[in-house]
Amino acid sequence: MLADIGYVTVIAAFAVAVYAVAVSIYGNWKNDWRWVESARNASIAILGLVVLACVLLVTALLQGDFSIDYVWRVSSREMPTYLKVTALWGGQAGSLLFWNMILAVFTATAMAHKWHNEHERYLLPHALAVATVTQVFFLGLTAFVENPFTQLAFTPADGNGLNPLLRHPGMIIHPPMLYLGFTGLTIPYAFAMAALITGKLDEGWIRITRRWTLAGWLFLSLGLILGGRWAYDVLGWGGYWDWDPVENASLMPWLAGTAFLHSVMIQEKRNMFKMWNMFLIILTYCLMIYGTFIVRSGVISSVHSFAQSAVGPLFFGFISLMFVFSAYWLIRRRDELASENRLDSLLSREAAFLFNNFVILAILGATFWGTNLPIVSELVTGEKITVGSPFYEQVNGPLFAVLLLLMGVAPLTMWYRTSTQRLGIMMRWPALAALVFVAILFFLGIGTWGSLLGLWIVTFAAIITLLEFWRGTAARMRSKNEPVWVAYANLLARNRRRYGGYWIHVGVIVMAFGIIGTEFFQQEIQINLNRGESVELGDYRMTFNGVRQYAGPDDLIITEASADLYHNERYVRTLYPRTEFYTRSGQPMSIPAARSTIGEDFYVLLILWEQTSSASAVFRIYLNPLINWVWAGGFIFVLGTMIAAWPDPVDNTVAAASVRRRRPSLAAGD
């Protein structure tokens, strides 16, 4: 009964989505706003239906209704309640349904916005149609290919249980954040296409979607950071990013979105780069669909991806369709997208942002090539050729260094043209201070040439960014006679977009320090210890106490080691690294134990345990300097994005004025 109602609900949502696309196009064609309103109401109805379907599936998971194939695959009777709920996105069919719900939330919320002026109302029918076409595709997959309510011929006594990799607390938040990021970026794409179709190619569509873009980009950023933390805690290799194809599939739309967010500021300020900005948002959307294809098709093997599925060709077809559709309108409007202004100087803020975009797209291109090399090589040679972390680090490492250097230089540039002399004066002292810092490290014997160069770049960018805060604060202190913290708070409140962006840069810089620390200074050892034996690494000494084995919840068998940790011969704490074996699936997991400080992590993995007359165990131990700076930088990054996305007081004033000045729509029936 539950399965039947759920499936009918999904079919109804698909039918309503098709209706919404059709009547939004018809209403625009007939210039009749009543049909557009009907389509907008339909988008809200889609949300209600998809939410109902998700509630029904979660109910089945909580009740242990193993007559439903999806429930049997991803849950079991003894699984904790919170894991039964999160199992909604623990498999292919359920995660597609969940994806549909989040996409419906974004679409319904964006379209339910009160459209105050004629410009916005003119874009609405087309934006609604484009966004809902995406919804139609994903609902079609859910209804006809990956139905989460498919029933089994008989009802098993118990289920298989959730994939062990997904039982980490981080996986409660990580997939929803990625889904929010991916689906959120559909809204700016929809309005960009609406602008292309209608020919309304000024910055109006950018103003409408600015915070939608920031919201999608923020969620995608959170998903990447949380994914790194999950990898660090669960995958047991001592790191947080391995350039896995699915990791790359999330990184690439984030890179394209980052380039777009920087580039649109030039269009708003100087009415330049219109064609470029359209290209970037189209690229972001296509990479979002492509990333979903990589995760769900199984075409490229990954520890993160779902099993091979029939959705692969459908995804490829949809990507091709939307790319051709986008390219057609981009080419058709190419003359109208020509910039009204030209780049006046290579030493200007416009040029700095453009160079920033080129470097980001170079990173994206290298990542795209490395990710797709197995597909290309198999098509050409019949054999799959893959590249690992060394390829990405050798190619993208220098590019990221250039990007950080630009991050430092760009705030010093001015619009239109920057004096070489002025730029040199403003760069001189930060460059010298950064040089003194790395010189001290060099004479202390710390670091290699590569790490010292990286530290110089990051320190240089950090000093310049912090000086930007100080200059603005000092100016308010002089002009308004305000105390330092009051001046800073008012500075931030009155220009959230600019200084929120600087806080994002601070987050990136802090993360960069952490990445350099782990990449260049990580220490590693693997050793077999008998009970009572010790091993030293850095300033630490670890003494192995023994191992115990016991039954965990559900089908879990836990093997847990105990080891005392000493820092400079002072007892710190006892660590308990363990392995977990899921008997139902036969899958083992290595769960590390770590002693974390602001400066480093002592990170221990239990690799092998031999139960003999004298118990011994094999450990792999990492000393990860500055690893927690990565997570701290991620927090600052998110905080900066929230500041930048928060409406400025001036925006509220403009919005209020817009309401007072609004004119009735020309659409019939309004």
Image (tube, rainbow, N blue to C red):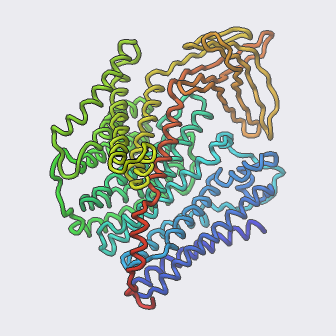
In this picture, residue 18 sits left or right of residue 153: left
Task: Inspect this view and state whether residue 321 appears.
Answer: no
Q: Nearest the camera: 458 or 616?
A: 458
**As displayed, is residue 165 above or below residue 87?**
above
**As displayed, is residue 77 above or below residue 93?**
above
Q: Which image quadrant is residue 327 in?
A: bottom left
Measured from the top left, where is residue 452 in percent x and y?
Answer: 35, 22
Q: Which image quadrant is residue 168 in?
A: top right
Quarter of the figure with the C terminus: bottom left
Q: Nearest the camera: 291 or 298?
A: 291
Q: Nearest the camera: 653 or 449?
A: 653
Measured from the top left, where is residue 407 in percent x and y?
Answer: 33, 40
In this picture, residue 644 sits left or right of residue 138: left
In the displayed image of the protein, which residue is found farthest to the right? 157
Task: Inspect this view and state whether residue 646 appears.
Answer: yes
Q: Residue at x 65, y 50 (%)?
A: 90
Measured from the top left, where is residue 513 in percent x and y?
Answer: 43, 30
Q: Nearest the camera: 176 or 307?
A: 176
Q: Residue at x 50, y 69 (%)?
A: 110
Measured from the top left, where is residue 165 in percent x and y?
Answer: 65, 40
Q: Residue at x 44, y 31 (%)?
A: 389
In the displayed image of the protein, which residue is found farthest to the front? 481
In this picture, residue 311 sits left or right of residue 11: left
Q: Residue at x 26, y 69 (%)?
A: 333
